[in-house]
Image (cartoon, helix red, strand yellow):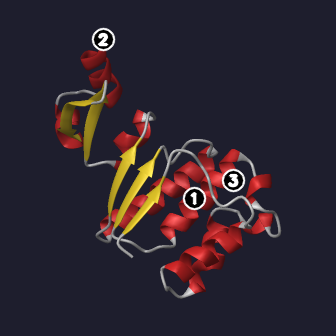
């Protein structure tokens, strides 16, 4: 498995349960399914046992999408608005897991409008406005300039 992608629109297969989605992912990727219970528990999806994805909330569907990316054990992930619809506790768990993932050699591209999360997680950030990169900066340089991503965004856009 090379790449994992979580699109902005949470769209796990509607007719499968969260467990079945993860089973499908590990089968397609020809992986051992030993981590399925871990990820169901991590995202509190074990409580959804027997419920198909079409009957889950948007936040629960987002958890299924993230779990299916995280279980893939790839070295590269693209996450589009990964924190949308997640409660603050789950957001915190996801941030911590992503930090560990990067420390172990993984790479994550995150598209987010939640600039505080980007500041907490990223080494580098790009400000994109009207489809074009307006600024590419390391977070270290941002801090040296006494800026936040939000301030930089406002300077560029306003």
Asked whether, in this view, residue 156 is left or right of residue 53, the answer is: left
Q: Which circle marks residue 158 in the picture? A: 2
Asked if the residue at tag 2 contacts the one at tag 3, i.e. Cβ–Cβ closer than 8 Å, the answer is no
Which part of the image, by quadrant, shows the N terminus?
A: bottom left
Given the current orientation, which residue lies at the most extreme top position?
158
The image quadrant of residue 137 is: top left
C-alpha distance separating marks 3 and 2: 36 Å
Instruction: Give above or below for 91 relative to 50.
Output: above
The residue drawn where x is 62% and y is 66% is 42
Residue, disc 1: 65
Q: Is residue 5 left or right of residue 17?
A: left
**Residue beneath label 3, please?**
60
Between the C-alphas of marks 2 and 1, the distance is 35 Å
Q: Can see residue 125? A: yes
Whichever of labels 3 and 2 marks the residue nearer the N terminus, that label is 3
Say which quadrant the C terminus sits in. top left
Which mark is first along the chain, 1 or 3? 3
Q: CA distance from mark 3 to mark 1?
A: 9 Å
Q: Determine whether, in the image, residue 29 is placed left or right of residue 86.
A: left
């Amino acid at each position: 498995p090379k790449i994992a992608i979580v699109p902005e629109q949470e769209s796990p297969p509607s007719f499968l349960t969260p467990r079945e989605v993860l089973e499908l992912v590990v089968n397609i990727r020809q992986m051992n399914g030993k981590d399925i219970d871990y990820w169901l528990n991590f995202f509190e999806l074990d409580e959804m046992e027997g419920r198909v994805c079409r009957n889950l909330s948007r936040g629960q569907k987002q958890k299924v999408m993230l779990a299916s990316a995280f279980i893939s054990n790839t070295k590269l992930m693209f996450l589009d608005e990964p924190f949308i619809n997640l409660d603050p506790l789950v957001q915190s768990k996801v941030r911590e897991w992503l930090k560990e993932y990067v420390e172990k050699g993984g790479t994550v591209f995150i598209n987010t409008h939640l600039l505080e999360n980007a500041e907490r997680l990223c080494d580098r950030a790009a400000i994109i406005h009207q489809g074009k990169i307006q600024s590419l900066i390391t977070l270290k340089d941002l801090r040296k300039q006494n800026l936040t991503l939000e301030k930089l965004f406002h300077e560029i856009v306003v």
